[in-house]
Image: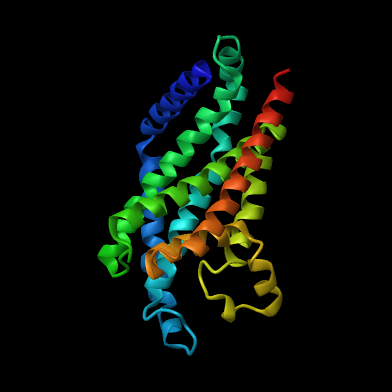
Amino acid sequence: MRGLFSDTVQIWLRASRLALRQPVWVLSNLLEPVVWLFLFGQMYGSLARLPGFPTASYLEYFAPGVVTMTALFGSAWSGLGLITDIQRGTLDRLLATPAHRLALILGRVLHTGLTVAVQCLIILLVAGLMGAPTATGAPGALGVAFVAGLFGTGLSALSHALAVLVPREDPLAALVNFLSLPVIFVSTAMVPANFLPPWMQAVVRYNPVDWAVEAVRTLMLDGWVWNVLARDVLLLALLTALFNLAAVCAFNTRTR
């Protein structure tokens, strides 16, 4: 177990160093959510004046959605790094070392989860400066980062499982594009559930994106509503465990 932990840390450090060597990628992942906050906040600001809208401003409502979207898009593409290592032969060289095989996947997934958590903390700071503060203060912000990191870890594991099964960039990119936008739109990330068609309202409750949005929005707007937070975090934790198991099984099958 100690070897698995230390090897996971080493793979995480390697992934972190590779990310820091591409500052344009890091900056774009931070600037894009800020653009979403500004553009959508302006574009759909009049929605807050409609009867039944839950917040006084659209920015307050949309900011938790941006946090969740940051976690989604920041982790869904993470499997591309594994594909690059497979194609360059880097993975085969890592497999020839004494490193624990599980660490080769878990270290990458951990890197994505922690990166997403830091990104979301920065987005919270920007949202607060724009007029959408976190009601639960600094502890709540850490809670939001935990939820985003947990959600990102699960999606990163799924992305890595797909990367192992479909070890080419084009099919993986097509799958990510096909899945990402529908799950965002069929959630309360951008509009309240009562503004959605009845069939979407039925689907929303089973959408993992909405579990993350609801937990983040509760912390940002409503406070420590423990029954809501416990339910959503538990569902996200179960989903993350399932996706990590899928990633490990797919990786073990490929490297046998």
- Please name whichever residue, 256 or 223, is drawn nearer the observer in this view of the structure: 223
Residue pictured at 35% horizontal, 37% vertical? 23
Instruction: Measuring from the top left, give residue 145's x and y in whole percent.
Output: 40, 50
Residue pictured at 38% horizontal, 72% vertical? 59
Instruction: Measuring from the top left, give residue 170's x and y in whole percent.
Output: 65, 40
Q: Is residue 124 above or below residue 58?
A: above
Instruction: Measuring from the top left, give residue 26's x and y in whole percent.
Output: 38, 42
Residue pictured at 42% horizontal, 76% vertical? 43
Q: Residue furthest bottom?
A: 51
Side of 25 relative to 125 (left or right): right
Residue 123 lies in what quarter of the image? Answer: bottom left
Residue 138 lies in what quarter of the image? Answer: bottom left
Q: Is residue 188 above or below residue 7?
A: below
- Please name whichever residue, 132 or 17, is drawn nearer the observer in this view of the structure: 132
Do we see residue 14 in this rendering? yes
Residue 184 lies in what quarter of the image? Answer: bottom right
Q: Is residue 192 above or below residue 36?
A: below
Residue pictured at 35% horizontal, 51% vertical? 142
Instruction: Measuring from the top left, give residue 175's x and y in whole percent.
Output: 67, 47
- Please name whichever residue, 20 or 159, is drawn nearer the observer in this view of the structure: 159
